[in-house]
Amino acid sequence: MTIKTPLCDMLGIKYPIIQAAMGPFYTTKLCCAVVNAGAFGIISHTNLIGVDPIKDMEESIKYVMKNCKGNFGVNIRVARLQIDAPGLMELIVKLRKENPEIKKRLKMVVTSAGNPKPPAQFFKEKDKDLLVFHVTPTLYHAMKVDGLCDGIICTGYEGGGHQSYERVNTTVLVSEAVKNCKKPIVACGGFSDGRGIAAALAMGAVGVQMGTRFIATKECEFHQNYKDFIIKSKDSDTMVCQGAFGPIRLLRNKYAEHHGEIVSKDEKMATEAELDVEAIQEDTKKYGLVYEGNVDEGPVLCGQSCGNVKDIPTVKELIERMMKEAEESIKKIGKFVVA
């Protein structure tokens, strides 16, 4: 027996699990491992200093095509500051048009960190067979996406990386979105085991998206220091700081303490007034430090689920363990229903 949801049919996968994008870092090798394990892998939108994001994306797609056999997707951050997003969208359409095998297997683009309308309209006009999901942090945003995209990834405040000022938690957000939206809802933020998958399905989601839990796997290309930092951390060891695109949840370290906690939108306005291109580029260099293993002086993206991550298995071991636990949890819940 196994768990099969509409997400499995949409994406052509065995298990209703999506590996979250975690740009600006690479998740190319991780994507391959996730795909080979029966779930849905995502290539991240990378833009570390000295990297050409468009060329990098093309190389990553070719790598994934060569090193795994199932379907996969890519992430494109579409914030106003993300000037490479249009080029990435053109690249995806071009590759799918030129290569039938890429068209068959590159099933979805996940857009995030910006306005979903321009990319959704672009892909609808240029490549209507390509699925587009968008990441949303509130019911308001989810309802906006509902009329634009093929699916909605509802990411609650527990999640790592980019966050919103509204601070809506996953359980609240997913329940609201399922009730008010017609498109399939994928739950994200705080998921790290099979019990979480069962809970997401009970709320009405068609699957889950996970980032932090997948970092701590053998195949993930993140530095070992990053993985070890997650393993030793508690759920209370993250903090939300100001990032280039808004709030960002990080593990507490020297870098995060220097940036300080985000308190309100008023602070956002004051901080954004100070942001310029040079400042953003300088901050991006700090991501490079983390990627090389310096997890004290750069931003270590991580969700509150870190407290539930205590080992570094293979991706296959992790997914199979989670699905077994999810099945057992659902069976236990079923016993609570009595005549």
Image (tube, grey):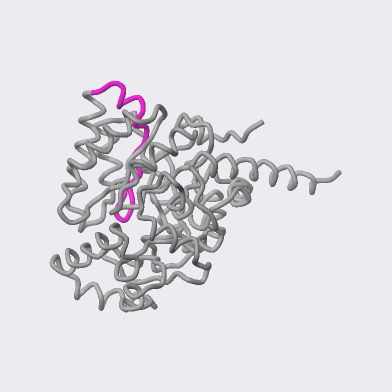
Instruction: Say which of 134 and 140 sits in front.
Output: 134
Give the extent of the magenta segment: 99-116
- Count how many numbered circles sit on residues in the image: 0
Give coordinates of residue 9: x percent, y percent. Answer: 50, 30
Regarding residue 182, the answer to whether it shows in the image is: no
Left-right relation of 30 to 102: right
Q: Name the outermost residue toward the right.
A: 339
Is 180 colored magenta in this rendering? no
Image position of 332 (left or right of 213): right
Which one is nearer the viewer's eye here, 168 or 14? 14
Q: Nearer the viewer, residue 13 or 284?
A: 284
Q: Is residue 16 visible?
A: yes
Query: Residue 43 lies in what quarter of the image?
Result: top left
Q: Is residue 207 above or below residue 246?
A: above
Choose between 60 and 231: the one closer to the eye: 231
In the depicted structure, whether residue 115 falls above or below residue 101: below
